[in-house]
Amino acid sequence: MKKLSLLLLISFLAAAPLSLFANEDLVTLSTQEVVAAAAEGLSSGDTAWMLTATVLVLFMTLPGLALFYGGLVRSQNVLSVLMHCFAIACLASLLWFVGLYSIAFSEGNSFFGGLQNLGLSAVTVDSMSGTIPETVFIMFQMTFAIITPALIVGAFVERMKFSAVLLFTALWLVLVYAPVTHMVWCEGGYLYGVLDLAGGIVVHATAGISALLLAKFLGSRDGFPEKLHVPHNPGMVMIGASMLWVGWFGFNAGSQLAAGESAGMTMLVTHISAAVASLTWMTIEWLKTGKPGLVGIVTGMVAGLATITPASGNVGPLGALCLGFLAGFVCYFMCGIVKKSLRVDDTLDVFAVHGVGGIMGTLLVAVLGTATFGGLGLGTAASGLENTTVQQLMIQLKAVGFVVAWSAIFTVVIIYICKLITGLRASPEAETAGLDQTEHGERAYHFE
């Protein structure tokens, strides 16, 4: 009954030019001249920036997110969390090469890309994506496919089988992440045109909703919610969070796909939102508990970054300040609502921070992206005129509702598949001993 109620709640929330190569004189050109002609639109500045941004986004998962999550769990489970993040990075990379990139970014129908680029068979050294090599674009987008399922790890730490983690990740990337990416970011996709620069919908909404459902179906840890385990290493949490902050500049500003004015503004508003959300979260916690905590201030930072992500291409500094404040305030109280009211053991608050933050930023860009708040403008209607706030809000609501429903439905399907094939949850004995030893045969700390 509780699972059915949660599903009903989720459903409610869901309310280079080719003509160049056609020139017959081209057959007389040397190989070097053909490559130069194909790369005529190449920008070395854009390429250098996108190479850097790609490294920054991968740095967010390895080691940023791994350390952030690893420090938040008990000492007997820290290696399992690091293992989850590292293995997911490897698995997502392989699947991206095999077919996910083709599903996400090839021409197809409104929901799925075609399979004509399986194994990157259509990609060559001189293939271009705008002003950068397509190989760089592939790598950049691959890092997004790595970190998105890795975010979900925070919902099931300390109690999910490693074999189930791998199977769930593989199926989730195929059935949720790649299709949503195609619908939102690929021209011709069902939701193409919604304002989502770097993944408020594609990354945070999908991961947040899926994390909430997976945590519910998986079940709570022993003693939840009365007995909450404290982070074993807050210092590790802060180090990982700091890496996330730095890497997020590649995540958001890199999504402009060029080294220009837009990337500069995106970087600025990203930083402002993170700083304001951190201070907001810290202040609320200080007032409620009498102590400003390190874990709290860095969690607020993550909430601010998740919230600014979809809006970072449209809002100005004032809008970033507003989003940062709302992220710190709303996400703080949502953590309590999920755990105490919904009684879902979303262990590291993936839904409350990433899901709620990403959805909130996706919707509020329709307001804060306007000139009234110093924004850079909204989307353009078929008439060629800029959308009004109401028009843009309807577009954003439709996209959020559809993706929430899509993610919820397929996540439940994947959960039942995993239950049949691998089982989901580790045994009570394994949970008591810790997954480091029982799943991986290792210990993080040796004091002998």
Image (tube, rainbow, N blue to C red):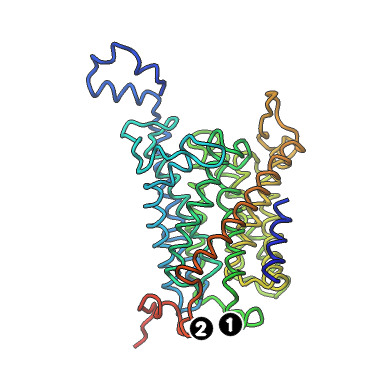
* Residue type at numbered disc 2: Pro
Say few, some or many: other residues with alpha carbon within 10 Å of mark 1 (under 14 / 14 to 19 / 20 or more).
Answer: few
Q: Is residue 417 above or below residue 199?
A: below
Would you say the residues marked 1 and 2 are in contact, meaning their CB atoms lie under 8 Å apart? yes
Could you tell me how far apart the alpha carbons at marks 1 and 2 are, in whole angstroms? 9 Å
Q: Quadrant of the C terminus?
A: bottom left
In the image, farthest residue toward the right:
390
| Image x and y of residue 218, in percent | 57, 72
Q: Residue at x 40, y 37 (%)?
A: 116
Residue under label 1, please give it: 222
Q: Quadrant of residue 331?
A: bottom right
User: Type of residue at label 1?
Assistant: Asp
Instruction: Please state which of residues 348 and 53 is positioned toward the viewer in this rendering.
Output: 348
The quadrant where residue 155 appears: bottom right
Label 2 CA crowd tier, 10 Å (few <14, some 14–19, many 20+)? few
Farthest residue in the bottom direction? 448
The one nearer the camera, 277 or 66, is 66
Helix, strand or loop under label 2 = helix
Does dot 1 land on a helix, a strand or a loop? Answer: loop
- For the point 56% across and 60% down, which residue is it? 413
Q: How many marks?
A: 2
Residue topped by disc 2: 428
Residue 32 shown left or right of residue 130 in the figure: left
| Residue 82 location (% of width, % of height) | 42, 67
Q: Quadrant of residue 115?
A: top left
Give the position of the N terminus as an image quadrant: bottom right
Residue located 70% across and 56% down the image: 11
